[in-house]
C-alpha cells in the first residue's frame, strides 16, 4: 500500500510523496507513522484500502494533507485543523521561539498576551503552554476558525479566551476594557489578491481567503495597523511579533522604526527568509 501510494503521489507531481504517503496510509490504518512501520507485514482490510484510496484521491486533487488527516504538528503538539482555518506552518514557530527568549522560564508568571487572527489557535495555545503562568486572548473574525481554535484549546488545556471580531477593532476593544498587553502576536494576511495564481493549489483552492489575502493594493495593511496599535496596546517594554511575507521586511522595518518604538528588527527563519518583525515598546 505504501509503495502504491507513493507512486500515485509522485505521478501527481507532489514533492514530498514518500512522507505524504506515510501520513495518509497511517491515517487510513488509524495508527501514527511509528505504528505504521511496526506493522508493515500486516494484512490490509478492505475498509482500510477504501479509506486510503479516498485520502489519496483527495490529495491528488491537491487538498492539503492536514485537512485530509485532520491535524498538523506545531511546536511538537498535534493541532486539529480543517477547512476554515489556515494550516499551521513551521516558519510560524519562530514567533514562539522569540517569545520564549523574551519571557524566559521563571519570568512568565502573569504575562498577558493576545493573538490577532488566531485561526486554528496554534500560536495562542502554544504560547499559553510554553510561557508558564501566562494567559492569552485569541481573536478571529471567522466562526469556523474559532471552532478549530476552541477544539485545540480544550484538547491541550490552555488558558486562552476566544473572541470573535475584526482583529484590529477587537484588539482596541480588549485593550480599552482590560489594559495593555505584555505580548501581541499575529500571522496576518499579507498576500496580494493579484498574486493568487502564484500560490500552490493546496493554498489557493482550499485555505481560507480571509486568512490569506490583504486588502487589494495594500499588502501592509495588517502589519501597519498592528504597529500603530502597539504603542497603546503594549505595556512599556512589551513586545509585538508579526509574521511577514517574503517581500515585506524592509517596509515593515521602516514603519516600525518610524513609530517611536524602543527597538525594531526583522528576524530570519531557518530558511534564511526575513520572517518576523519584533517591535518593543
Image: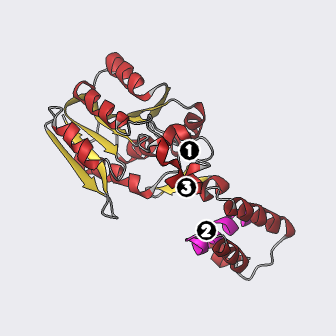
Q: Which residues are magenta?
A: 15-34
* Residue 129: % across, % down: 41, 45
Q: Earlier in the sequence, mark 2 or mark 1?
A: 2
Q: Is residue 140 left or right of residue 81?
A: left
| Residue 11 appearing in the image | yes
Q: Is residue 92 above or below residue 256?
A: below
For discs 2 and 1, the disc positioned in front in the rendered view: 2
Residue 19 belongs to the span the image colors magenta = yes
Residue found 63% across the figure and 44% down from its top: 83
Find out whether the residues at labels 3 and 1 contact each other: C-beta distance under 8 Å. no
| Residue 105 appearing in the image | no
SS of the residue at dot 2? helix
Residue 223 belongs to the span the image colors magenta = no
For discs 3 and 1, the disc positioned in front in the rendered view: 3
Q: Earlier in the sequence, mark 3 or mark 2?
A: 2
| Residue 68: mark in rendering | none
* Residue 117: % across, % down: 45, 36
For discs 3 and 2, the disc positioned in front in the rendered view: 2
Q: Which residue is mark 3?
A: 72
The image quadrant that residue 114 belongs to is top left
The image quadrant that residue 125 belongs to is top left
> In front here: 268 or 157?
268
View extreme (bottom): residue:
41
Mark 2 to mark 1 CA distance (whole Å): 25 Å
| Residue 155: mark in rendering | 1
Judge the density around disc 2: few (<14), some (14-19), many (≥20) Cα neighbours within 10 Å.
many
Mark 3 to mark 2 CA distance (whole Å): 12 Å
Q: Which residue is mark 2?
A: 20
> In front here: 224 or 47?
224
> In front here: 41 or 272?
272
Q: Earlier in the sequence, mark 3 or mark 1?
A: 3
For the C terminus, the image quarter is top left
Amino acid at each position: 500500500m505504501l509503495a502504491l501510494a507513493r507512486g500515485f503521489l509522485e505521478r501527481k507531481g507532489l514533492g514530498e510523496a514518500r512522507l505524504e504517503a506515510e501520513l495518509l496510509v497511517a491515517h487510513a490504518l488509524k495508527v501514527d507513522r511509528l505504528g505504521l512501520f511496526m506493522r508493515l507485514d500486516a494484512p490490509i482490510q478492505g475498509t482500510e484500502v477504501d479509506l486510503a484510496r479516498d485520502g489519496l484521491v483527495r490529495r491528488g486533487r491537491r487538498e492539503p494533507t492536514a485537512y485530509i488527516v485532520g491535524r498538523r504538528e506545531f511546536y511538537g503538539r498535534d493541532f486539529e485543523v480543517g477547512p476554515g482555518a489556515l494550516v499551521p506552518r513551521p516558519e510560524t514557530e519562530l514567533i514562539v521561539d522569540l517569545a520564549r527568549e523574551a519571557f524566559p522560564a521563571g519570568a512568565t508568571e502573569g504575562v498577558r498576551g493576545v493573538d490577532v487572527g488566531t485561526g486554528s489557535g496554534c500560536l495562542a495555545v502554544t504560547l499559553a503552554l510554553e510561557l508558564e503562568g501566562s494567559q492569552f486572548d485569541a481573536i478571529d473574525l471567522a466562526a469556523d476558525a474559532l471552532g478549530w481554535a476552541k477544539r485545540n484549546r480544550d484538547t491541550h488545556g490552555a488558558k486562552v479566551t476566544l473572541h470573535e471580531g475584526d482583529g484590529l477593532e477587537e484588539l482596541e476593544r480588549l485593550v480599552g476594557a482590560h489594559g495593555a498587553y505584555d505580548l501581541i502576536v499575529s500571522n496576518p494576511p499579507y498576500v496580494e489578491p493579484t498574486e493568487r495564481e502564484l500560490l500552490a493549489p493546496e493554498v489557493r483552492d482550499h485555505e481560507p481567503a480571509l486568512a490569506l489575502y490583504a486588502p487589494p493594493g495594500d499588502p501592509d495593511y495588517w502589519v501597519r495597523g498592528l504597529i500603530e496599535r502597539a504603542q497603546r496596546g503594549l505595556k512599556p517594554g512589551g513586545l509585538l511579533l508579526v509574521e511577514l511575507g517574503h517581500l515585506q521586511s524592509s517596509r515593515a522595518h521602516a514603519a516600525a522604526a518610524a513609530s517611536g518604538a524602543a527597538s525594531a528588527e526583522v528576524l530570519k527563519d531557518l530558511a534564511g527568509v526575513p520572517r518576523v518583525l519584533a517591535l518593543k515598546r
